[in-house]
Image: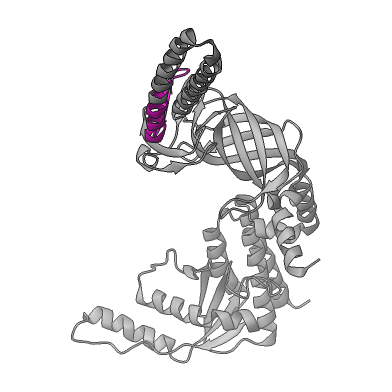
Amino acid sequence: MDARLLKRLNSFLALEKKLRQAANVAQVAQIACSDSQFLLNFDTCLFFSGSRLTLTAASNVSAVDNTACDTQRWQKLVRENIQQSLDKGPLEVAIPSPPPIDRQHVDPQHTDSQENNKAAASGQLMVLMPLDAPDNAYSRKRPDLGCIALLRRHPLSPQELEVFRELAAAVRQALLALRGTKSFSLRRWIQRRPLIFAAAIIAVSLLPVRQSVLAPASLAAIEPRIVSARTDGVIRTIDVPPNARVDNTQLLFTLEDAEVTAEIDRVQQEIALYSERLRMARQYNFQQTAAGYKLAQAETDLFIRKLDLEFQHSQLEKTRIRAPSSGVAIYTDPAAWIGRRIRAGEKVMEIVQPNARRIQIDLPTSDAIALPETARVMFYAESNPLTPIAGHLTYHSLLTSEGENQPASYRLLAAIEQDQPHIRINTRGHARIYGARVPLVYYLLRKPISTARRWLGV
């Protein structure tokens, strides 16, 4: 074997050994720039690290000043040509001459240094070798590991180009080994273990989770007592304010009773008249025994008028609506009811017990999932969503109803287990209803599958 070839081989093996023993990226960069001069002929070797292609090390230099003009010029040149180098592999770029120097504003020593650099840069080439793997699709968009650049006056020969590729491969392996021991990359882990990643996704998709739906709900009273008018009429006065506590048989509101009062006055006057006729018939009956039929007729007429008076009094009592039980009277603004004509049986207010309440849910038909008989329910009030009310399902309607601006929905009722007394009755919010356990993939894709089925008409 040629002695020079054997010497280069030993140098390459020594370089690989140093790269394996490097503790950080800076050491790898310094070794690649300093020890590679035994393998290749160049004027300067530059190491650009990371995706930003920052100059980290240079041959025969202990530290790199990133604020120097030459450093900025090398970094700019590399960044402009790195994409072409990633596509084509090693790329030889002609180094442009540095800009002219204004001698009036620069000291003589700095001028001499710039002149020397200019003379040295004239006719030089930069050979770019990216460190990312050529088959990596991600690295074709942006560099990840960086690149090595050689400054020399002549292009690389095919043999030197092959050595340069092996040098870059060794540096790449060292950088990947350091990255694997110090940091974790999910993208790299997925690329190396696709089957394990696929199995993990399938296992997570099959995890059983409790299915649940969210529906509009409110706190409704249990068996509220409906207060309605017993006859047609106009509301004259309301004797209790909204949300006031009332007692049994307490007067709630009064209807207009002018007609009934006038009719009572008329009947009372007729009773007085027929009472006088009865008195005269009794006196006349003592004088003539044949006038007994007139006495019976007068008594019948008076009795009919008294029955009419009792009827009118009952009609007058119907205009005074009283509380059917003790509780809290709930209705809207009194001004909206006073002077309003209502029909018999029309609801005016409710008498409820504030502590006797339950959760009333309107479950849309599109969200109707299979629910157990005593499904768990959590009610979240819009005014206080951080203090939910727990309960369980007690009633599930089989009929649907449609409200104004609301879709068709089922009526559900839930008993309260852990109440929050500070949340008022009739408070609106949303209730989450928990059903049976299903795979996670079904829980996540139930809505998209349903939407796709409607669009595709399957």
Q: Decide which of 216, 227 is in the foreground and name it.
A: 227
Locate residue 441 relative to residue 293 in the image: left or right. right
Q: Position of residue 86 (x, y in %)?
A: 61, 79
Q: Decide which of 366, 345 is in the foreground and name it.
A: 345
Q: Is residue 452 above or below residue 293?
A: below
Name the residue: 60% across, 52% down.
Answer: 183
The picture quadrant where one finds residue 218 is top right
Q: Is residue 228 above or below residue 439?
A: above
Residue 203 part of the magenta segment: no
Instruction: Give the image's coloring scheme.
Output: one colour
Residue 251 part of the magenta segment: yes
Q: Position of residue 55 (x, y in %)?
A: 47, 69
Q: Decide which of 436, 26 is in the foreground and name it.
A: 436
Q: Position of residue 295 (x, y in %)?
A: 51, 15
Locate residue 45 relative to residue 214 in the image: left or right. left
The picture quadrant where one finds residue 432 is top right
Q: Position of residue 181 (x, y in %)?
A: 64, 51
Locate residue 170 relative to residue 216 in the image: left or right. right
Locate residue 109 relative to residue 360 in the image: left or right. left
Q: Which residues are magenta?
A: 242-268
Q: Quadrant of the C terminus?
A: bottom right
Q: Quadrant of the N terminus?
A: bottom right
Q: Is residue 325 visible?
A: no
Q: Is residue 31 above or below residue 226?
A: below
Residue farthest toward the top in the current orientation of the protein: 286
Name the residue: 67% across, 69% down.
Answer: 169
